[in-house]
Amino acid sequence: MNPFTYERAAAADTAIRAASSHGAKFLGGGTNLVDLMKYGVEHPTTLVDVNHLGMDQVTPTAAGGMFVGGSVRNSDLANNPAIVRNYPLLSHALLAGASPQLRNMATTAGNLLQRTRCYYFMDTAFPACNKREPGSGCAALNGFNRIHAVLGQTDEGAASPHTCIATNPSDMNVAMYALGAVVEVQGPKGKRSIAVADFHRLPGKNPELDTNLRPDELILGVTLPPATFAKNSWYLKVRDRQSYAFALVSVAAGLEMNGGTIKSAGLALGGVAHKPWQSKEAERALAGKPANRTTFMDAANVALTGAHGYKDNAFKVEMAKQTIVRALTLAAQGVQA
Amino acid sequence: MIQEQVTPHRQKQMDHRYDAVAKVTGTAQYAAEFTGPFPAKDVTYGYVVQSTIPNGTLLSINADAAEAASGVLAVLTPFNAPKLPVPPPNPPARRNLTVLQDATVSYNGQPIAVVVALSLAQAQYAASLLTIRYKQEPAKLEFRKHLAEARSPKQPGKEPAVNHRGDTTAAFAKASVVVEGTYVTPIQNHNPMEPHSTIAWWEGEKLNLYDSTQAISGVKQSIAKLFQIPVDFVRVQCPYTGGGFGSKGSMWSHVPLAALSARVVGKPVKLVLGREQMFGPVGARPSTVNRIKLGATSDGKLVAMQHDVVMNASVLEDFTEHSAGVTKMLYKSPAVSVTEKLVEQNLGVSTFQRAPGEAPGTAVLETAMDELAIRLNMDPLQLRLINYADTDPSQDRPFTSKNLKVAYQQAAARFGWSKRPTQAGTQIEGNNLIGYGMATATYPANRSAAQAVVRILPGGRAFVGSGTQDLGTGMYTMLAQTCADSLGGLDPATVQVKLGDSTLPKAPVSGGSQSTASVCPAVQDAAAQVILKLSELVALQTASPLFGKGSSELTAKDGRLVAKNNPALADSFASIVQRNGNIPVEAMGSAEKSEGADAYTSQSFGAVFAEVAVDKDTHMVEVRRIVATYDIGTLLNDKTGTNQLEGGIVWGVSFALHEETHIDPVYGRTVNENLAEYHVPVNADIGTLDVTVLNIADTKFNPLGARGIGEIGITGAAAAVGNAIFNATGKRVREFPITPDKIMTA
Ligand SMILES: Cc1cc2nc3c(=O)[nH]c(=O)nc-3n(C[C@H](O)[C@H](O)[C@H](O)COP(=O)(O)OP(=O)(O)OC[C@H]3O[C@@H](n4cnc5c(N)ncnc54)[C@H](O)[C@@H]3O)c2cc1C
Ligand code: SF4
């Protein structure tokens, strides 16, 4: 770990000012950033602790939704009665992630920004990783790529400076996509709202960028729109062990039902792309249809259109389809206990 | 058939581990936690720098920036490190070590330098400032693409690599049913909770080590040889070991690197490996690719078995994982042929890991047996019974004790095996497919020469000491119990126990499940000698009621010597020692394999049954319950013993479903070198465990009637789970671990 200074900010604007210095980073729960510092992947010169800015509240919005402060811990959010009642999808996604100890530390903002678990990104002994060392190539492409992307990746060959097949590892984010959340941020020039779907990026030609957030922008929190999927939703995570494992594939499914017919749907996939994969086409394919297996299979096929796997992760295409069908089936029946 | 019905004399068991309080209150000191006898502030910190290429030569290491960094005392590289008198490989160290004696790089992750600084953080930071240049050579990787290049091991290890009996070709030709398949087990890293750690300091030519190890005398011998100093100049201490599972059974490079660094800086050097540094430099279980062919008559009698295994080995050193070993002895088959071959790889050295040979061996053979049972349309348990071996078929000699049939019956009944769905994929509960599976467990009973000392202290308390180790397994408890029992029934909690110090009488490596079976008989012997000495003393003590008695007339009971023919005549240990001028009375004891051990095979067995639920859409497996019954001789302590067996089963579930070291095919580096990505089961992965033992003493093996139990638990369990998955889904996955994707695509 490199030497660095630590500052505890008392207000949002001082935090933002402190973060404007070159190489500064905000510190949330530290469960991702500090690990990456120890691995030598991140080397901030200053850590600006943003845990004491009063961003730890969950409050109703005038529009009938909820606002979740950026410092709200994952455990607190998952167990918040209003969230459990109105956004059970989010609660279950949070509880599917990591371990109780990690969730007690992890914050909403930090979770939004957690970085990929790509082995080659996390271990500096591998020379090729465009995300860590722009232009160095992508070791994952010909490496062990079981946890990697099948949708939306950039694959121009292992030596290309653009290639990246990493996935976003978050569970919370997948639910945020299906719920249509909005990220509220503040920078030196003021505040702005970013729809979560526009918050994260696909690798495109800049795999080093995970999101469209600027380094000196502070996440104040997340706005959830009024709940539409409180009665019918399911978060389903397929993983290699029963707990404490990242998703091979996960599905956040929310349905607004009208009798046996789907009025509207929210559907996002985790573990398959550089960002949670929200399929607007699949959501449209569900709307107005009867909630049955044929509808769900059609939606699954639409969602996976264009998917392309590699040596170790080709299974994800079929696994994602089966998981979508199952999650939609369960969502149509009701809500996760 | 029960061959022996000796009711053994049962030791009084301790209700809690001897070291429980010390462990729970944090007063038990592990190797890296010592702060003396040297001044605590003198301790310096070593950090091992590892190679980032799999094969080649170091051209240079520029340490200017590192040496200038704050707190840095020394940077040792192959270009400046002191030359050892005997560069490795050297046979007593057994391992081909990499201790900065040359610039060759043989695997990615190999130690290539050590930074010593005033703090660990300073050492690690300075390591990041090194500029390292290599000349790279093409690396030997992806061994499964090179199976055809396999060769026989240069040294076979504990068993011959090739073994044939009968005429397999003729027998297969006559068999009515033949099953054949390739079964793969992965590379696995041991990952004990406590990382490998050493504190080394010199006093002139004398070397002291606190070292987290399974073998203090092994480390002592190896390092003395490496530094060419008299063995008596080395002292190794390790009162507690936080698990080892074989990875601490030999001395690896970090130990001499700590000693070398301590010599250079002239201060104690503490060197603790990071979790990521435990994937390569301290051994791994190799991956095995097993081609197995079984031939049987239509009524299920095996007529031929063939098992050809190819595994990865390091270019540095051969190691054979005898996964074909169980095929030679588990069942009665007139014709058996096994071969074991290696493919050299630019990887760290392979080594023994919990149940080496038997763990992968039972995983693959017992899967093949399940396939044979399915083909024969026969109950898998019935197939085992039909081929039951009353004597050891591999050596054609009797067992000292074998009661596996009873174990099968007991476990099957406790499990409810009779309710097994005979057709795979037919038992459905909601979205879950339910399946039952079983397999046989087995592990040899090993025993080596060991010594111990027993002392009666002023006040009458007993002391027992032996240079053995406690890996969290219960050795303190075993020594306390055995000493208390052998002295005529003391309270084991009052016995002082010391182990883990090479100045104590010598004991073997804590490996091969042999420690209890080896060391406890030595304690019994020492205790008997002490009783004799007390008797001789008391005979001369005029003030004693036992004055003038011959030692044959006396026996020890409840902390006293008692006249056999008149129990009213007695004298306490405390009084005898007091009359001795309060000089403790002590005796050495020793024990080795029983005479005639070569006429028998001593082997433990068990029957493992598993129930799984497999989700039909996510293909995730839930192990609902495992029921196992073991034939391991006498169980000396229910708590520590059951704990070993249950822990072994958890390892078996891990083998079945979770564990695998993934090596990058291009760079040869482990990609999942941390406990987030290297999966072992979490609590939610383990359902109920029902473990019982037959408790039938094996007194032909040793006077305690107890065989080792540290490893057998892992055997059989992986196959039982895999066979249950087949029974649930009708899908056979022949490559461990059985992850959801493999079930989905099978
Ligand atoms: C072993 C392990 C297993 C895990 N398993 C899972 C899992 O199964 N599922 C899952 O979803 N997650 C998992 N996680 C990841 C975990 O969810 C994240 O580490 C956590 O959410 C990050 O939150 P944090 O507050 O600790 O972030 P930090 O580590 O503090 O920060 C992460 C990033 O966010 C930035 N940041 C923090 N706060 C702000 C802010 N207010 N504004 C702008 N930027 C900010 C930091 O600068 C940093 O770049 C696991 C983590 C570990 C270590
Ligand atoms: S997939 Fe992306 S993060 Fe992983 S090695 Fe390639 S460029 Fe780096």
Image (tube, coloured by chain):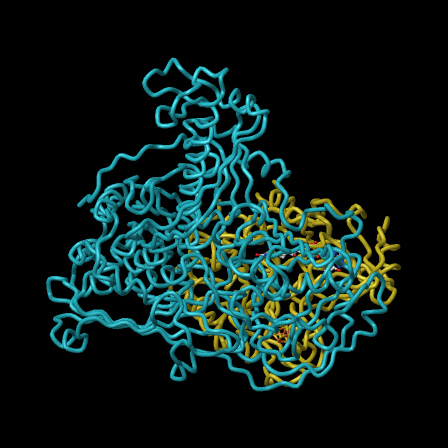
- Across and down, in percent, residue B210 comes to 64, 51
Q: Which chain is cyan?
A: B
Viewer-proximal residue among B651 and A190: B651
- Across and down, in percent, residue B100 comes to 67, 73
Q: Is residue B425 left or right of residue A77?
A: left
Could you say which quadrant of the image residue A274 lies in? bottom right
Viewer-proximal residue among B518 and A211: B518
Q: Is residue B395 left or right of residue B222?
A: left
Where the C terminus of chain B falls, by quadrant? bottom left
Q: Residue at x 73, y 60 (%)?
A: B262
* Residue B262 seen by the camera: yes
* Residue A203 seen by the camera: no
Where the N terminus of chain B falls, by quadrant? top left
Q: Residue at x 53, y 78 (%)?
A: B346
* Ligand 1 visible in quadrant: bottom right
Q: Is residue B715 left or right of residue B396?
A: right
- Across and down, in percent, residue B433 comes to 32, 55
Query: Number of numbered discs present?
Result: 0
Q: Residue at x 22, y 38 (%)?
A: B5
Q: Which chain is yellow?
A: A
